[in-house]
Amino acid sequence: MTKNDQALVEASDFALALALLTRLPVHVSDFARGARAAWSYPLVGLVLGGLAATIGFLGHWIGFHPAINALISLVVLVVLTGAMHEDGLADTADGFWGGWDPARRLEIMKDSHIGAYGVIAIFLGLSARWSALWILFDTSIPAAVTGLLGAAILSRAALPAMMAALPHARASGLSHSTGRCPARTAWLAIGLSVGLSWLLLGSAALAAALVVLVLGVGMARLARAKIGGQTGDVLGATQQLSEIAVLFLLVA
């Protein structure tokens, strides 16, 4: 079977997506489909957002302050992903604004050390998510739960779209090894994320999806200008910024 003849959806795709995007103990023996499993990234967001919302609800049931419930929900998201996306945000900030040409920017992004731009990006990103979740938990538990779920789902739909729209900026790394996402896979992820978020957020899902679209287009143009394509770090940064944007929209 050629790549073009491969099925759009296979039963193993969800487990593969969980193995790629989380630290959950999921065993996958074959990573050959790679980016073709990206249609299920919104389902991974549903799992992560659901677990974070559950812990936050337990904190509310115990009687914790909304700020604490927001914090522990955020910690769950970070721990379950191994801070993969946060690391991508930091590396992207360091590389995009710390280098003078694409080669130097990619070199900085690959460096395991973190610079001032990266530290600031992580601090502001975590602060933004915590503040928004605090407001949502302070508003109501349903608002916090649907907000966590919607933001986690929509922000991960941005990844296959970015993978399909941009070439790989380097010939190595996680994104390159995963492969180029087919356009139909990206469209399925987008449709799935909008459908799920509509069930959770109602008509606000359309506005949230539009915000993610605009942000994704902006990140794609910036990445093409800075490094000529996308990397795993760029994908992580896109997820983080999309999640923040959705949470801010819901707070507003």
Image (cartoon, rainbow, N blue to C red):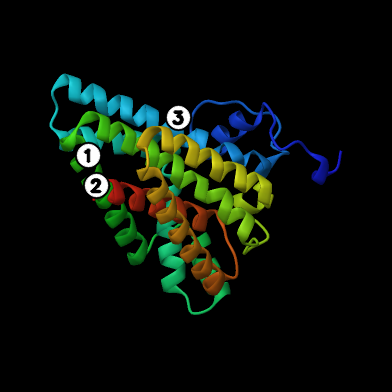
At a point 34% along the width and 33% down the height, the residue shown is 76
Q: Mark 2 or mark 3, which has the lower sequence index?
A: 3
Check disc 3 and give the amino acid type: Val
Crowding near the residue tagged with mark 3, few <14, some 14–19, many ≥20 C-alpha atoms within 10 Å: some
At a point 26% along the width and 35% down the height, the residue shown is 143
Residue on which the image places disc 1: 136
On the rendered structure, is 214 left or right of 244? right
Secondary structure at numbered mark 2: helix
Q: Mark 1 or mark 2, which has the lower sequence index?
A: 1
Crowding near the residue tagged with mark 1, few <14, some 14–19, many ≥20 C-alpha atoms within 10 Å: many
Check disc 1 and give the amino acid type: Leu
At a point 55% along the width and 42% down the height, the residue shown is 191
Crowding near the residue tagged with mark 2, few <14, some 14–19, many ≥20 C-alpha atoms within 10 Å: some
Secondary structure at numbered mark 3: helix
On the rendered structure, is 38 left or right of 32? left
Determine contact: label 1, label 2, CB under 8 Å. Answer: yes
At a point 54% along the width and 38% down the height, the residue shown is 192
Residue on which the image places disc 3: 47
Q: Is residue 220 above or below residue 50?
A: below
On the rendered structure, is 57 left or right of 207? left
Residue on which the image places disc 2: 251
- Residue 144, label in figure: none
Q: Looking at this view, name the residue that lies furthest to the front.
A: 203
Q: Is residue 238 visible?
A: yes
Check disc 2 and give the amino acid type: Val
The Cα atoms of the two marked residues, 2 and 3, are separated by 22 Å
Q: Is residue 225 above or below residue 19?
A: below
Which quadrant: the N terminus?
Answer: top right
Q: Nearer the viewer, mark 2 or mark 3?
A: 2
